[in-house]
Amino acid sequence: MTYLDSLLLSIPFPYSLIAVCTLMVCICLLAVKAHALTWDGAAAAFAVGVGVLWCLMLEGFLILMFFFLSAGVLGRISRKYKNKNLEKKEGARDAVQVFANGFLATLGALGYYFFSTPVFLVIFIASMAEANSDTWAGEIGRLSRRKPVSIRTFKPVEKGISGGITALGLVGGFLGSASVSVIAALLFPIGRIWMLCSMSCLAAFAGCILDSLLGAYAQVLYFDPSTGNVTERDTDAQGNPLEISQGIRWVDNDMVNFMSNTFSAVLAMGLVCWI
């Protein structure tokens, strides 16, 4: 337990909750001002942040902030390499994006708070590690000098297209998963923590690979006749609806992220229970 944890516990309820909420309001407002979150994204981040900070205290909050800050920094670095004609969302994260990456982590934090069972901590760590792995893989992969190849056909595809992978992106994805796992192992001094975090790291990277597979096989893409390209956007520049080129209509990029995140949490939980 850190000094700040002790300080928070020493504040009587409900003043401790007011302190946590005030801190998150300040952070979310700064994120909106920095164009890292939309207003609805800030509301979602507030809910996730309060849940994690209250349940896992400073340790969980530091992991959450590491993901958020590293994603922001890498996003700014790779911004000029983003294909705005292909990618549906760029820039500030909205509520759907926040919950797609943070819902399972919040459930894990709540479970660990109420039951103190390491399995729930693993769910939190694996979920955060997968979100970080996927983010790092995408942002670092954009910096690759070589065109990505489709994980489905292994033929070159445009940067930003779902299911495209690069060697640099795969390395970035593993480093994203490993960084969160190592930080978690250093912050949570419980029994077998390094083993738990190792399983979380592997499950998170597997989730990152699954994200690319789902992007290639299941994610909906539309054909834009005005540009002759496929895109994640369901309307053209004039707002006219586009026809589906491939994939399942309800499986957009946010759904792919949520499915991959859920897979990583369940896989990590299964590995830990098995071992």
Image (cartoon, rainbow, N blue to C red):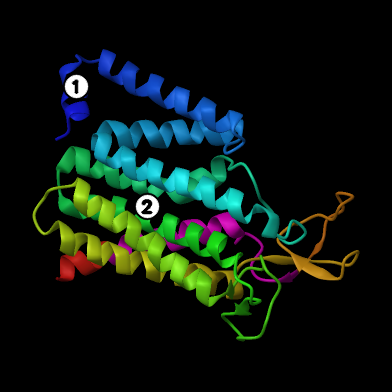
* Amino acid, disc 1: Leu
The answer to whether residue 263 of the structure is visible from this angle is no
For mark 1, give the secondary structure: helix
The answer to whether residue 110 of the structure is visible from this angle is yes
- Tell whether position 256 is magenta: yes
Label 1 – label 2 distance at C-alpha: 26 Å
Magenta residues, start to end: 245-268
Label of residue 7 in the image = 1
Label of residue 128 in the image = 2
Image quarter (top left, top right, bottom left or bottom right) of the N terminus:
top left
Q: Earlier in the sequence, mark 1 or mark 2?
A: 1
* Amino acid, disc 2: Met
For mark 2, give the secondary structure: helix
Q: Residue at x 22, y 69 (%)?
A: 271
Q: Residue at x 62, y 80 (%)?
A: 149
Image quarter (top left, top right, bottom left or bottom right) of the C terminus:
bottom left
Q: Are marks 1 and 2 in contact (CB under 8 Å)?
A: no
Q: Position of residue 71 (x, y in %)?
A: 50, 49
Q: Residue at x 56, y 75 (%)?
A: 166
